[in-house]
């Protein structure tokens, strides 16, 4: 395996990456800040819920992997011969040791404890001895693997407040992990909805892998009627915009659980939802909060 490293200006990162993978047979392409660890380093991402400072770094390093040195050399030659790549520079071309990338990736994901008896376990791991309930979930395209505090806090609440909920809604389901957790903890019927088709597909696959049954998996308009429990682990800004929609979906006497909220954003969310319910802080972890409201 050989790695070609290129210095690429911001506006050419996407077309160069597409050319490397689509036309020049690169196995993969990764992107990082070319000025990382220097005085010129720039933050690419802002805080959750806020727009990024800019769409990309001023200069990026693209690492493209090829099967052979000849392929990497030819790719660099053909790429730099194009009129539009005049600002692209070759940084290096070097051999890299072969590795079991699947195994190395899997090592990054260990079982995640929600409670001592409730765990999220990737398919390549055995459940811990204390586990009595297990969600089998592998990393994928959709958000929600259990490694993020917002997901863990929602699942902890579900486990600690398990009840025979007649209907539960997971709004913005991502991987479907909260819907699966609710189905495992007493819910009679669970709906999971998301605007992203990849999330819907991921939820359907994860539901099948865990042997649970959901009533509905589909787009947001599939959520109808009212629910004893509405779960929304998204981000503060969409949660504010969705307040009338989510509030209308909670049945009288039902519970609303909101996550994806930073501690500094909690008061704003409380004010937004004050016309429907009082939101209390149910849990806090690593600067994130879990907000709970009862619709009495």
Image (cartoon, rainbow, N blue to C red):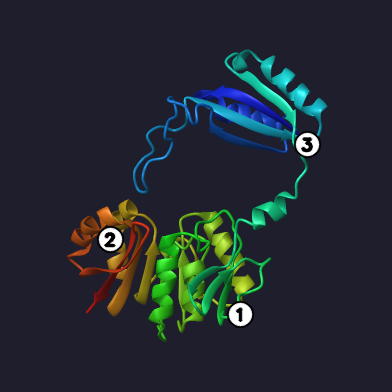
User: Residue 1 got which mark?
Assistant: 3
Q: In which quarter of the image is residue 128?
A: bottom right
Of marks 3 and 1, which one's residue comes earlier in the chain?
A: 3
Q: Quadrant of residue 250?
A: bottom left
For the question of whether residue 170 can be seen, the reply is no
Per the model, the C-alpha gap separating discs 3 and 2 is: 51 Å
Judged from the image, the secondary structure of the residue bearing numbered disc 3 is: loop
Dot 2, crowdedness within 10 Å: few (<14), some or many (≥20)?
some
> Viewed as shown, does residue 288 lie left or right of 148?
left
Judged from the image, the secondary structure of the residue bearing numbered disc 1 is: loop
In this view, the residue farthest toward the bottom is: 164
Q: Name the residue under label 2.
A: 243
Judged from the image, the secondary structure of the residue bearing numbered disc 2 is: helix
Viewer-side label of 2, 1: 1
Q: Are marks 2 and 1 in contact (CB under 8 Å)?
A: no
Dot 1, crowdedness within 10 Å: few (<14), some or many (≥20)?
few
User: Residue 129 got which mark?
Assistant: 1
> Residue 58 at what x, y percent from top left?
47, 25
> Viewed as shown, does residue 124 lie left or right of 56?
right
Of marks 3 and 2, which one's residue comes earlier in the chain?
A: 3
Q: Which of 104 and 193 is in front in this view?
A: 104
Name which residue lies at 17% across and 65% down: 275
Q: Which quadrant is the C terminus positioned in?
A: bottom left
Q: Which of 143 and 203 is in front in this view?
A: 143
Viewer-side label of 3, 2: 3
Per the model, the C-alpha gap separating discs 3 and 1 is: 40 Å
């Amino acid at each position: 395996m050989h790695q070609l490293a290129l210095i690429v200006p911001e506006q050419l990162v996407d077309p160069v990456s597409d050319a490397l993978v689509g036309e020049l047979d690169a196995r993969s392409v990764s992107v990082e800040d070319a000025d990382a660890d220097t005085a010129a380093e720039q933050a690419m991402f802002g805080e959750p819920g806020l727009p990024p400072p800019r769409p990309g770094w001023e200069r990026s390093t693209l690492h493209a992997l090829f099967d052979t040195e000849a392929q990497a050399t030819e790719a660099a030659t053909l790429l730099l011969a194009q009129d539009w790549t005049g600002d692209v520079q070759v940084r290096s071309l070097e051999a890299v040791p072969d590795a079991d990338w699947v195994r190395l990736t899997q090592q990054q994901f260990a079982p995640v404890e929600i409670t001592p008896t409730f765990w999220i376990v990737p398919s390549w791991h055995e459940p811990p001895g204390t586990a009595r309930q297990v969600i089998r979930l592998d990393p994928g395209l959709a958000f929600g693997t259990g490694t993020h505090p917002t997901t863990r806090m929602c699942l902890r609440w579900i486990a600690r407040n398990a009840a025979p909920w007649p209907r539960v809604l997971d709004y913005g389901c991502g991987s479907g992990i909260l819907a699966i957790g609710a189905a495992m903890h007493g819910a009679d019927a669970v709906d999971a909805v998301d605007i992203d088709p990849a999330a819907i597909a991921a939820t359907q696959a994860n539901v099948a892998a865990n042997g649970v049954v959901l009533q509905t998996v589909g787009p947001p308009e599939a959520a109808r009627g009212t629910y004893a429990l509405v779960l929304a682990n998204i981000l503060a800004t969409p949660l504010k915009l969705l307040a009338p929609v989510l509030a209308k979906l909670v049945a009288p006497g039902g519970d609303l659980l909101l996550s994806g909220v930073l501690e500094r954003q909690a008061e704003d969310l409380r004010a937004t939802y004050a016309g429907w319910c009082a939101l209390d802080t149910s849990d806090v972890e690593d600067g994130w909060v879990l907000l709970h409201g009862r619709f009495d």
